[in-house]
Amino acid sequence: MKKILAVANWKMFPRKGTDAKKIFDGIKRTATKLKHVETVVCPPFVYLESLGERVETRNCVLGAQDAFWEHEGAFTGSVSPDMVFAAKARYVILGHSERRALGDTDEIISKKLSAVLLFPLSPIVCVGELTRDTNGAFVHTVRQQVSAALSGRTPADIARMIFAYEPVWAIGGTAKRACTPSESREMISIIRQELAKVLGDEVKAGKVSVLYGGSVNEENVEGFVLEGGADGFLVGRASQDAKTFSELLRRLERVGKK
Ligand code: PGA
């Protein structure tokens, strides 16, 4: 049985390193005890190294929120996969909608992905439509984003990739509502169809992890595991507080046992 992957995306929080340590330690206390859940905390870059010293088990590790496509050089403000790997990150989020809104195109994401795949890092590629329409254009958008990320990849690379379906309209404080588990299941199966097209094999496509993200919290997470078809979750707001995220992790463990 695959473990449920719980990814905490802290975004640009918290303001102080001392708070980052406190939140990480609180999450770690719960996460290290769980058998059915693997936890990944993705803090802002500046906290990676100090939190890296606090990682104790493979059950609760770190991820970066992005990585640049070059290894080093005159790229002011950028951080390379080499650097995040050295700082003990083992996952890298790529193409989050908040980065896409700041200019990351499918082409840029693909370049970043190629760089990340050179390291023993697991890329988490975020895809998702801005809005839903009635003529199915949103499905086309998601297929397009997935196929751009898969283009030119070997089956071995694809086996290391993780996708996260994150409908932009369901993310963050301004979200009108969360996605329903059935909406999530439908889109996750569309992502798997794209994977099967490239891999030529539904069984192999089924082995690639696909997460759901967007207004996931401790109240709705069980429903998403049971009916949403996701292998795990990318959690924003509900991951920025140790108590809330620990409760979410405990609920995942409970459903993971079933
Ligand atoms: P949210 O963010 O959980 O706060 O909606 C999710 C995300 O942006 O990954």
Image (tube, grey):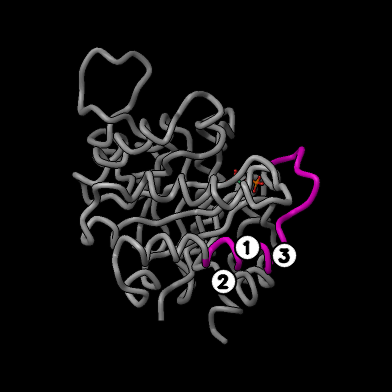
Task: Please tell me the numbered disc located at residue 203.
Answer: none
- Given residues 239 and 116, the one toward you in this image is 116
Is the CB–ligand 1 distance for label 1 below 8 Å?
no
Task: For mark 2, give the secondary structure.
Answer: loop
User: Badge 2, how many Cα within 10 Å: few under 14, some, many 20+?
Assistant: many
Task: Please tell me the numbered disc located at residue 184.
Answer: 1
Task: For mark 3, give the secondary structure.
Answer: loop
Q: Amino acid at mark 1?
A: Ser
Instruction: Report which residue position mark 3 lands on.
Output: 220
Instruction: Report which residue position mark 2 lands on.
Output: 229
- Given residues 60 and 187, the one toward you in this image is 187
In the rendering, at what x and y percent does residue 247 appear? 66, 64
Q: Residue at x 63, y 62 (%)?
A: 184
Q: From which residue to which does the magenta span run?
A: 172-189
Residue 240 on the magenta span:
no
In the rendering, at what x and y percent does residue 34 appear? 49, 72
